[in-house]
Image (spheres, rainbow, N blue to C red):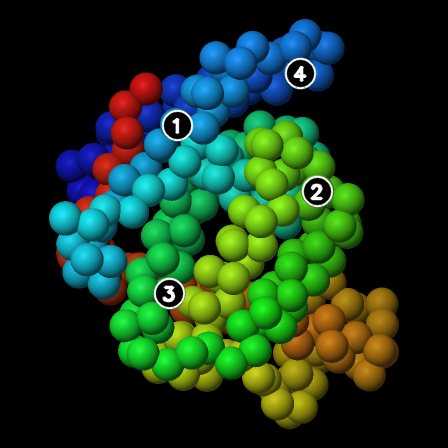
Amino acid sequence: MHRGHATLAAAVGAFLVCTAASLRAEESGVPVASTDRAVLDRVAVRFYAPETGGNARPRFITERVLSFEARLLAMSEQGASARSAPEERHLHQAIDRHVAEELLSSLGIEGGKETPDLSRLADDARAELEARIGGEGPLRDAALAERIDPEEVQAIFLRHAQAAFYLDHHVTPLLYPDDRQLREVFRTAAHPFRNKHFEEARKDLARWLVAERLKGAESAFLQTARTRVKIVLVGH
């Protein structure tokens, strides 16, 4: 990705212009043409690595999914509206996270073992995100804005859960913090549950801590994988 930073920035900038224009049209009451809808469903990113089958079996991120995932990052970090176009940095973060989770999920599948409680882990991830962005409504609104159907939303959380399971079992424990760790985090960390007693906040705090740990572990994993991962922004 070293040579591609300028190209990446240019492609992401063009994508932001298209997304913002579509949002302005929808918010002003102007129907978005069917051709615009097709543009929003184009491939935005192509990537491959040994974990995914190499150059012969590239993976793709569509514009709709990329914009949706970037919206969720902006909403969870800054309290942005579900209708707000994502910023460039959120698109970069969304690409990195999506690629990291695809690689980790592929490693888990290659291991030949089924992930127990995958649906429960996905539900926990959904509940934690909804707590950050204000509930089920904003998640649904963000999905509607990008025409992401419920099955696609669930697939994102399942990928997230598969990646988390692989990291927990093969890299570093992160899914099940014990009581001592939770109490220490509750006492010292800048978490969103300061106005609650520990026992009241325990379940939500555990989900929050797992999400924070996972974010850091995915980022660290991708940094170590940079030399073997090829990420290409598809031109606009």
Label 3 vs label 2: CA separation?
25 Å
Label 2 vs label 4: CA separation?
17 Å
Residue at 67 percent of width and 90 percent of height: 179
Q: In the image, is 182 to the left or to the right of 214?
A: right
Toward the viewer: 32 or 129?
Answer: 32
Dot 1 amino acid type: Arg
> The N terminus appears in which quarter of the rendering?
top left
Query: Of label 3 and label 2, which has the lower sequence position?
Result: 3
Dot 2 amino acid type: Arg
Residue 220 visible in rendering: no
Numbered label attached to residue 217: none
Secondary structure beneath disc 3?
A: helix
Secondary structure beneath disc 2?
A: helix
Classify 10 Å Cα crowding around label 3: few (below 14), some (14-19), many (20 and above): many
Residue behind mark 1: 42
**Foreground: disc 1 or disc 4:** 1
Secondary structure beneath disc 1?
A: loop
Label 1 vs label 4: CA separation?
19 Å
Label 2 vs label 1: CA separation?
22 Å
Query: Of label 2 and label 4, which has the lower sequence position?
Result: 4
Residue at 82 percent of width and 83 percent of height: 199
- Cβ–Cβ under 8 Å for marks 3 and 1: no
Q: Position of residue 12 (x, y in %)?
A: 38, 28
Query: Of label 3 and label 1, which has the lower sequence position?
Result: 1
Residue at 73 percent of width and 10 percent of height: 29
